[in-house]
Image: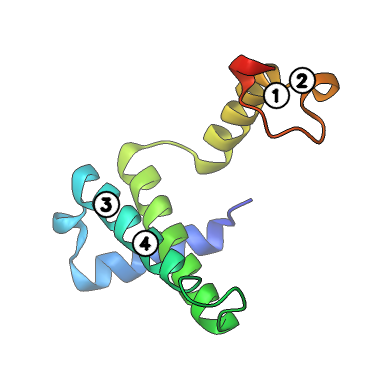
Amino acid sequence: MVTDEARQALRAFVRERDWAQFHTPENLAKSIAIEAGELLECFQWNAEPDPQMVRDELADVLSYCLHLADRLGVDPDQIVLDKLKRTEEKYPVEKARGNSTKYDQL
């Protein structure tokens, strides 16, 4: 899902600026929440927001998520696949298809 090229480019960007010292897990988690708010803001008053603004904010969210995964030493692809497997068990197709009910109510 995430290319090694993207990961290396993000690492180089941070290294060149000596920003790793600021990238504590706490600060990165805060940054994810802040950037997610900015992404949501794109849709605040308009169901058809500026596509470039949405792409930019989504890139910021994803970048901070990748920074946090890197800092924690976890593989983003693997943790997504692991979580998907657990979620598939909570939401079996025969019960969840076309249904937005929470898993404990299915």
Residue holding disc 1: 88
Q: Amino acid at mark 1?
A: Glu
Secondary structure of the residue carrying numbered label 4 = helix
Q: CA distance from mark 2 to mark 1?
A: 6 Å
Find the distance from the CA under tag 1 to the CA under tag 4.
28 Å
Q: CA distance from mark 4 to mark 2?
A: 31 Å
> Which residue does the numbered mark 2 point to in the structure image?
92
Q: Residue at x 80, y 20 (%)?
A: 95
- Residue 71 relative to residue 20: left or right: right
Rendered residue at 62%/33% (across/down) = 81
* Amino acid bearing label 3: Leu
Q: Are marks 2 and 1 in contact (CB under 8 Å)?
A: yes
Classify mark 1: helix, strand or loop. helix
- Front one among 51 and 9: 51
SS type, badge 2: loop
Q: Which residue is mark 4?
A: 37
Q: Nearer the viewer, mark 1 or mark 4?
A: 4
Mark 2–mark 3 Cα distance, whole angstroms, equals: 33 Å
Residue 37, placed above or below residue 72: below
In front: mark 2 or mark 1? 2
Amino acid type, label 2:
Pro
Q: Label 1 vs label 3: CA separation?
A: 28 Å
What residue appears at the point 60 percent right and 73 percent down from the top-left corner? Answer: 47
Q: CA distance from mark 3 to mark 4?
A: 14 Å
Quadrant into which the C terminus falls = top right
Q: Quadrant of residue 55?
A: bottom right
